[in-house]
Structure formats: C-alpha cells, structure tokens
Image (tube, rainbow, N blue to C red):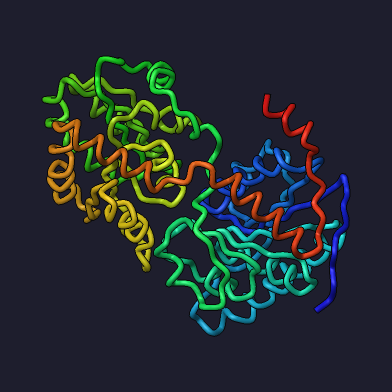
Amino acid sequence: MVSHTPTATHDQTIVFAGGGTGGHLYPALAIADAFRGLLRQVRFVFFVSQRAIDGRILDGTGCELMRQSLLPLSGIPWRWPRILASFRRSSLLCRSRISASRVAVVIGTGGFTSVPAVCEARRVGIPTVLLNPDAIPGKANRLLASIADRVFVQWEDTLARLPRRASAEVLGCAIRPDFLNPHRTKGLERFGLDPQLQTLLVTGASQGARTVNEAVIANLSYLQLRDDWQVLHLTGEQDFEKVDSAYRGTSIRACVMRFTGHMADALAAADLVVSRAGASTLAEITAVGVPAVLMPYPYHKDMHQLANARCLERTNAAKIVHDAVDPVVNGPALRHALEPLMTDSEHRAAMASAARGIGHPRAAERIAREIVSLAGERGVLLHSHSVEESCESAR
C-alpha cells in the first residue's frame, strides 16, 4: 500500500463518494455542515453519478462535483466488459483528483458510485468511512465494509448484516440542524395551519409517492368526518393536480403542496404522519418525535424500507401498512391504522415518546467528530477551530 499522509493545512479536502438518490446525498451534506463547524477552511469534493438529482441537490452548496460515468451493475455477461471499462475510467478520475489535493478522508455514502473513490483511498492509505443509514446494507456497502476503517449505521439491526470484520457503530443518520429544536407554532404559521386543530402530515419524501397519495385520497370521506383535524399533504410534482382537486371537493381543511424545503417545520406542526420509510425520513421523524403510519416502498427486491419501518414498529413508534399498490386494498388498510390513532391522543403521545427514544438528532455532529478522531489516529492532522473560535461561532 502506498503511504498518503496529509499534513495540517488551511486547505483541507474531504471527499464524499456516492449519489443518484437524496438518501445518498442529504446525510452527507448534513455531515459537511458539521465539519464546517469543526474545521478551518475545509473544502468538499463529491464524486457523484450522472443523474440530474445529484446536481439539483448539490447546486449552491459550495461543494465541488465530480461526475462519474459508471454503468450500473448487470447480471448479463455481455455487458460486463463495458461495466468494467467504466469502473476503470472512474477509478482513474478518482485517483487523479485525490492525488491533486491533500485529501484527509474519503466517505462513502452508499451505492455503486461510492466504490471507486473508497477503493482508491484505501489503495493509497487515506482513511475511509462508510455511511449506512438503511437497516439492510446495500451491495456496495457490503462489499466495502470489510476494507473501510469505520462504518456508521442508524440501526442496531444493521450490525448483524455486515461482514464480521467491519468496524461498525450505531450513531444514527445525519440530518440537518433544523430538526434539533422543532417549534410547533412556527411550523403551523409557515403552512397557514390552524393551531386549534390537530395536523395529519402526508409525505412521500421529495419525489412524492403515488400509492401513498392514492391511499389517502381513498380516505377523504373519513378525514372529512374528523373536523378536529387538518391535513398538510406533500404530493410530489406528478400528483399535485390530482390530489389538490380531490381535496377541493371536500370540506377538509388542507394545505396541499408539491414539496417543501422546510421539512422540520412540517414535522413540528404534525400530530401524526403518513409516510414512506426511507432512512433519512425516519431519522427526521424520530428526531422530532412524531407518531407515524409507514407505507414502505414496495418495489425494492430487498424491501429495505420495510426493514427500516420495523425498527420503529418494534419500539411502538410507528404502525406499518403494507403497500399493496392497489388503492382498493390500501385505502381500507390505511383507515384501519389511522382511525385508532386519530381518536386517541394518549396513544399518539406514547408513540411520539418512543420515536424520540430511538432518534439520533445530533448524528451529524457525532459522526463528524468521530471522523476527525479517526483521522488523528491515522496520523492525519485536521486543522480545527481553536477553543475561542468555537465559542465565538456558538454565540
């Protein structure tokens, strides 16, 4: 192995590798923010995919993007030469960019896009870290866990699913600091909601979830009877018109939106949430402490969202409604879960307390500090703020 030991510098570089979904990028950005509070003049390089979502999420963050032209893995043998060639090109790109900077650490955020940079870092002796917020590790993280210096996971369940040689620790999934101090009044005001009513939040995450939207629409007649409740429904772009029109035909007090960049306020306003079970979404729900009805994404082969949801269900922080895709089935199943929760405030309070009990609201800071400590153990001196500077920035 070639030795690579960056020295203390005012121009520190930390590499994040992974992309293609918000779940691979949003936790990384939260950790980057935590690093900015710990380190002087740090810069970030993201090795990402060619997907448009990577640019949309990282645009304006001040981070450098390096797009990789990796082809997806395939079980079809005649595609393997092209896949291997794309992997070699990506490895050379990573090698060139890493050698051009004094990179302190490479952090894999999940997915095949993370593999070349983590392998290159390992080859030259740069400390490597993996983020694994899902209960079931993906193929890339299972491959890399044995060679990474540390693996940070969100759930205890994950530890048994990693290779025995993996150095893994449960620190949670990094989320933005907005979720640390949720204010119900502020959340209600932001969305024009009535403070005298209880709020049902419906969300399919940033892209929306059609089957969740359809299941809720199938229950509008029931929601109309609950005149002590209001609804904040985040539909996603594609279903907005359909969902908005459905509410307009009822007397339900509802705020229907395509998307919000103020998810902390949305959760702060919520007394109950209906949601998918993505890792970042559950990290946010448990950080704020909101009882949830979860409809895990039904199309993944490994059903990792179902495994995520069970981590909450086991502690009585959430109820699971299995998404049958068909609204004729999902509608009654969702009502069966909603009815007892919307009529029992003590039950919701117990679930909220259970959610807070398994949350890791300060995961970003804890992970950043662990990485700084790892770098120090490996002889990489990260140049941090002085005590006086840290106190000043905290004021």
> In terms of image quadrants, where is residue 374?
bottom right
Tell me the quadrant of the picture where the C terminus can be found. top right
x then y, percent, for residue 23:
51, 51
Choose between 83 and 323: the one closer to the eye.
323
Residue 97 coordinates in the image, percent (x, y) = 81, 60
Most distant residue in the front direction = 387
Which residue is drawn at the image coordinates 58% and 46% (left, top)? 364
Q: What residue occupies the far bottom of the structure in this picture?
A: 77
- Of residues 137 and 313, the one drawn nearer to the viewer in this rendering: 313
For the point 29% across and 33% down, the residue is 242
* Percent position of residue 389, x then y: 78, 32
- Apparent side of residue 360 relative to residue 223 in the rendered image (left or right): right
Q: Image point 44% across, 72% down: which residue?
A: 161
Front one among 318 and 88:
318
**Residue at point 47% right, 66% down?**
137
Q: Is residue 102 left or right of residue 106?
A: right
x and y percentages locating residue 22 in the rendered image: 52, 48
